[in-house]
Amino acid sequence: MEKHIEIKLFATLSKFLPPDPDKFPISPGIKVRDVIRELKVPPEDVRIIFINSVRKDIDTVLQGGERVGIFPPLGGG
Amino acid sequence: MSETLVLESVASASREKKYPDGEPYKSLSVRDVFRISESLHIHGRQVETAALENGVIPERYARNRKMLLPEEQATLLRSSVSVVGLGGLGGAVIEILARMGVGFLNLTDGDKFEDSNLNRQLLSNEKNLEQTKAGAALRRIKEINSSVEVSVHEEFVSHENMFRILGKPDVIVDCLDNIKTRFVLEKAAQKIGCAYVTAAVAGVSGHVTVIFPGDPGLEMLYGHPDEAPSKGAEAELGNLPPVVTLMVSLQCSEVARILLGGKSILKNRILAVDLTDNTFEVLELE
């Protein structure tokens, strides 16, 4: 059964946002890694992944309903 | 210098004033701080500290007073902060810390101003291009608050020089513009045993966090130091000024909280901002 997640991509990654980032369809049980691949985000640009406001790793399994935020490295001062 | 003489000078120079809400207080003007400091051959910082310890408010801090008790203002004046990087973040951080009344500022940057700094680096102007950022920082602090004791280092921080440069501050503020050196600074903070307040920006995004000795720290943001890139998204996006000064405000707010003994709100958390849609999120790092 199809479920949805909410996606927020920061800084340089925002150009990979899907058309409807608040309702991105997923199959429950897939990993963040799969979403990143589907969005064509270069994996080397992924530095921090947040799921429901908590830092998680790239192999975290999604069930639908989560808010997923992804950061590239920011280093400017 | 006899403490009694300082207190007598402060007491005789102080004037009754009222806050905008009508509450009376004893005020010491900037000019009187200069005068006492010169006549007794002591630093303005010592005059102001003595005043605060005796319930007299140096007028330059009068608008801090409803948020900071006199003893808290005195604590700031006795506090020491090392700011590394005097560009977009650092140039504004030192402005805020000096105005707030942090008594000792240790400032480090080996860089010089260039034209492309002018959009966001408050210390830069059309007259000081190609001059050192550290020199401009020193002049700026002296103009704003001569009660702040400033030391400057016109060099880039490295593993070799970090302890000599940083001294033993209460807090280190990371305002660097590259990721590799951030790890150097974090390591120094861990060894010195002080809090490390770090922010980074790119485009209209930024994040700020506070790392204490023993915390997992920067690796949570950038991965293992050996695999971290030197530059981040800012190489592609540049930096628009609003997010820079926004991060500065958050850094300075945390610095003051830590100096005053409060619990840091951003320990093991990151405050992430994206001004494309005004996203503000506090995210848990563990």
Image (tube, coloured by chain):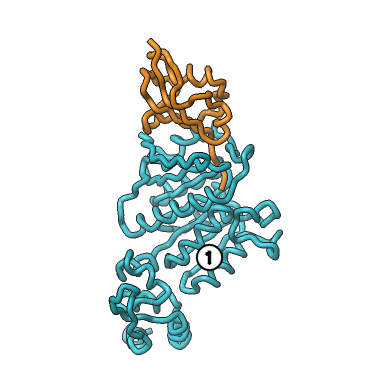
Chain colours: A orange, B cyan
Asked if residue B54 can be seen in this view, the reply is no
The image shows residue B148 at horizontal and vertical percentages of: 47, 70
Task: Tell me the quarter of the image containing the C terminus of chain B.
Answer: top left
Classify A60 as above or below B24.
above
Q: Nearer the viewer, residue A28 or B28?
A: A28
Classify A34 as above or below B27.
above
Chain letter of the residue beneath label 1 in the structure image = B
Classify B122 as above or below B235.
below
Task: Tell me the quarter of the image containing the N terminus of chain B.
Answer: bottom left
Q: State left or right for residue B172 relative to residue B115.
A: left
Q: Nearer the viewer, residue B202 or B153?
A: B202
- Count of numbered circles in the view: 1
Residue labelled with disc 1: B151
Asked if residue B206 can be seen in this view, the reply is yes
The image shows residue B213 at horizontal and vertical percentages of: 37, 45
Q: Nearer the viewer, residue B238 or B135?
A: B238
The image shows residue A21 at horizontal and vertical percentages of: 48, 26
The image shows residue B59 at horizontal and vertical percentages of: 40, 77
Q: Nearer the viewer, residue A75 or B244?
A: B244
Residue at 33% x, 59% y: name it.
B260
